[in-house]
Structures are given as C-alpha cells and as structure tokens.
Image: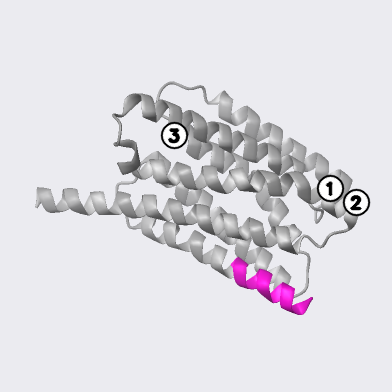
Amino acid sequence: MDSLLERVQALSLIAILSYSLPVILVSFIRKRESTENWLMVCFAYSLVSEICALTLMYFRFNPNYAVNQYNLLSSFCLFAFFYHAIPGGKSKWAFVIPAAIISVAVCFTFFRYGVDGHISYTMALQSIAIIAYSLIYFYRTMKELPDGEISKQPMFWIISGFFLSYAGKFFVYAVSRYLLDWYNDNLILLWDVHNGLTVVGNSLILAGVIIRLSRKHSRARIVA
C-alpha cells in the first residue's frame, strides 16, 4: 500500500507542476484578456487545491477535504472562463445556472456522504458541461475561421486541453462511485488515470499559452 501511495503522490506532484507552469507563464502577459485572467484563476485554484490534497495525503489524512472544497466552487471559475472563451452571442445564465446547480448538488452530497466523502456523479455533470462548452467553441470557431487557421489559435489548444481532460474524467467520475460502493475499491488506479488526464490536458493548455506568449513577443519585435 505504501508503494501505491507513493506512486499517487508522485503523479500528484507532476499534476501540480502541470498547473504551475501555465500560471507562471500567463502571469508574464501584461495586457491579459478576460479569458487569460479566468484561466489563471482556474489554474491557481486547482494548484492550491492539489497542494492541499497532497499535503493531507502525505500526513495520512483524507485528501477529499481539499478536493471537495474545490468541487464546490470550481464550476463558477471554469464556466466563467468558457463564457469569455466562446465566440459569438451567448447568455451568461447558460453558464451561471449550471454552475449553481452543480454547487448545490455538491452540498447535497455532503449531507449524504460527509464533507470528506467521495463525490463523483456531481462532478460527472461538470464534465458534461465542459465537454458541451468545448464543442460549442469548436463549432463556432470553425465557422468563423478558414481551414487550417484554427490550429494556429492559442485558445484552440487551451480548449482542446480541457476537452480531452474532462472527456476522460467523465468516465472516471461515472464509475468511481460504483466501484467504491459495490467493490470497496481503493480507487488508486482511477486516481492515477485522473492525474494522467490532468497532465495530458494541461500540457495542451500549456502549448496554447506558449503560442500566445510567442505571438506577443513577435508583435513586440515588429513594433520595435
């Protein structure tokens, strides 16, 4: 069990690093857009939660205390990012109402499983919403940009990172409660998959941030 715990902690450290790099790089952008500000908020919040969860795990406490406070409020940060990222007309209530519903659902699960309980089905709803917002972004962006141009957009890679990560996490959330209730599974394998999806998704997001920074420096050289 100790070796499995060490593996989880190692993957958690890699996930923390994958959250740290985009936050650091985005902070170098002086004139940030709303999408970049919300991206930094999302990643900074995730980073703090991951560090708290890893610290609790290291001292043999339940990491769900940190994970669940993230689950309670994360939808508002993530959906605010997508509200600014999706081009074209949209209603803010299409983002606020789902975020509020998910947060209320998390509160109800606290009463059933406790604040340190494992919340999965509610987070599966969050994953579905993020997948839907990502698909809307892809559809609208492909309509506006010519062929071959979308892959050159930094936001394309950032949204792709969220899409890939949460598409995989949906299945993790969908089956984890079942495995815990019926087979008393320790969920270590699923935790590894979750962290792996986080690292892969954040790598694509990091690529988008790097493209954004490279364009900023290119424009600065042209002006100079």
Q: Is residue 74 left or right of residue 183?
A: left
**Secondary structure of residue under mark 2:** helix
**Secondary structure of residue under mark 3:** helix
Note whether residue 29 is visible.
no
Residue 146 on image: x %, y %: 28, 29
Q: Is residue 8 magenta?
A: yes
Tell me the kind of residue under disc 2. Trp
- Residue ID for mark 2: 182
| Residues under numbered marks 1 and 2 in contact, where contact means CB atoms less than 8 Å apart | yes
**Chain part drawn in magenta:** 1-12
Q: Is residue 91 left or right of residue 143?
A: right
The residue furthest left is 224
- Residue ID for mark 3: 84
Residue 185 on image: x %, y %: 84, 59
Q: Is residue 139 left or right of residue 188?
A: left
Residue appearing at x 50%, y 59% in the figure: 19
Residue appearing at x 44%, y 52% in the figure: 204
Query: Rounded to the nearest whole Å, what is the CA distance between mark 2 and mark 3?
Result: 41 Å
Number of numbered discs: 3
Task: Pick whichever of labels 1 and 3 is earlier in the sequence.
Answer: 3
Tell me the kind of residue under disc 3. His
Tag on residue 178?
1
Tell me the kind of residue under disc 1. Tyr
Query: Which of 53/204 is in front?
Result: 204
Mark 1 or mark 3, which is nearer to you?
1
Task: Pick whichever of labels 2 and 3 is earlier in the sequence.
Answer: 3
Give the overall secondary structure of the magenta segment: helix
